[in-house]
Image (cartoon, grey):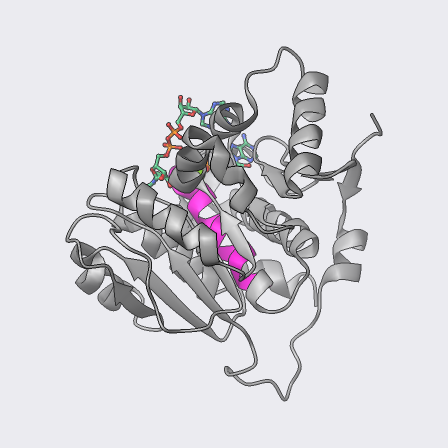
Amino acid sequence: MKAPILITQAEIQQIYKPINPKTHKGIQGHAAIIAGSYGKIGAAVLASKACIKSGCGLVTTHIPKCGYEILQSTIPEVMVVTATHEKYISEIIFDIKPQAIGIGPGIGQEPNTQKAFQEFLKTNKTPLVIDADALNILSQNKSWYDLLQPDTILTPHPKELERLIGSWRSEIEKLVRATEFSKQHQVIIVMKGAPTQIVNGESVYENTTGNAALATAGSGDVLTGIITSLLAQGYLPIKAAQLGVYIHGLTADIALPETGYQSFIASDIIANLGKAFLALD
Ligand SMILES: NC(=O)C1=CN([C@@H]2O[C@H](COP(=O)(O)OP(=O)(O)OC[C@H]3O[C@@H](n4cnc5c(N)ncnc54)[C@H](O)[C@@H]3O)[C@@H](O)[C@H]2O)[C@@H](O)CC1
Ligand SMILES: Nc1ncnc2c1ncn2[C@@H]1O[C@H](COP(=O)(O)OP(=O)(O)O)[C@@H](O)[C@H]1O
Ligand SMILES: [Mg+2]
């Protein structure tokens, strides 16, 4: 097994594309976020806000009905499509054509949500980020792995990863299993942790930003929004994953002297996105 390639500032500078002065929202990328259920609409808010604050021109968020007023009042910049069910996503239907979709934060695992996710996977050809409960649904329905498009990005934390690839007894075994999974299903696995590693077939990349302040509710939901935004802006999936985890971690490194570890919350990642992007310009 090769040593991981570090995701350094120099590497990121090669990947990062400054904003074209003549761009407009119509060509800056339209992202869709499919997230939330009753009691976890916050996950949809965090992912959507991180998405629009990471540079894409438009964001449409698909949520259950109960989240409508919450979304519209907390992030007026984001458009909203609601499912027919009050408390969970019962079907995934929208007439927009986004350039990237992020699915999973806070969606729960209701049977109807599972069915909707399966129907979605059967037809979806749009670049995709799969996180949280969508990963958990996937790991309970392993025959659906065949429905994943090449270069789909999966963003599991260690428990979600275990549900997908099974348990491991050492870091080496984890990497071997993740590599096998990535090659077999042609997916990119963002193995979140300290540090986060990205597995893309035989290649492993290791992030160099971030700290323990990120060990707080919703920080993964925010990462989903950031990576989906970058995908919608035309970054190749592996580049969107690398730049996304780097920027996400950088926000915590920037904020730490002011917030300390304890008072840093997921909204602070979003609040510091601007400074993190400026550090790349
Ligand atoms: N405000 C909100 O609406 C929030 C919604 N959330 C959503 O809640 C749902 C459940 O997510 P959870 O991740 O809490 O539940 P899970 O059951 O998937 O994961 C929790 C388990 O994973 C373990 N775990 C997590 N990170 C780990 C790490 N780095 N190392 C080792 N073990 C680790 C925990 O100890 C725990 O046993 C998801 O859909 C998620 O998106 C959460 O993101 C929290 C905030
Ligand atoms: N100690 C840590 N050091 C660096 N990054 C961390 C640490 N703990 C958590 N993170 C990061 O925070 C995020 C947590 O994601 P996740 O567990 O999915 O959160 P949630 O589901 O609550 O949104 C990941 O990006 C992970 O890498
Ligand atoms: Mg998560």
Q: Residue at x 64, y 68 (%)?
A: 234
Relative depth, front residue between 280 and 20: 20
Q: Is residue 185 above or below residue 177?
A: below
Badge count: 0
* Above or below: residue 33 compared with residue 3: below
* Horizontal and vertical percent position of residue 67: 21, 57
What residue appears at the point 55 percent right and 47 percent down from the top-left corner?
Answer: 148
* Residue 4 locus on image (x, y percent): 79, 34
On screen, residue 239 versus residue 263, left or right, reads right
Q: Residue furthest top?
A: 169
Q: Quadrant of the C terminus?
A: bottom right
Q: Is residue 224 magenta?
A: yes
Residue sitting farthest toward the right = 2
Is 127 on the left-hand or right-hand side of 216? right
Q: Taking 98 as reference, is 76 left or right?
A: left
Q: Is 40 placed left or right of 277 in the picture?
A: left
Residue 263 visible in image:
no
Magenta region's main secondary structure? helix
- Which residue is more in the foreground, 27 or 249? 27
Residue located at (56% from left, 77% from top): 28
Residue 208 horizontal/vertical position (percent) = 70, 40
Residue 153 in sight in this render: yes
Q: Position of residue 116 (x, y in %)?
A: 33, 50
Q: Give the answer, above or below, for where 146 lies relative to 18.
A: above
> Which residue is more in the foreground, 150 or 209?
150
- What span is in magenta? 216-230
Is residue 127 one of those drawn in magenta? no
Residue 106: name its quadrant. top left
The N terminus - image quarter: top right
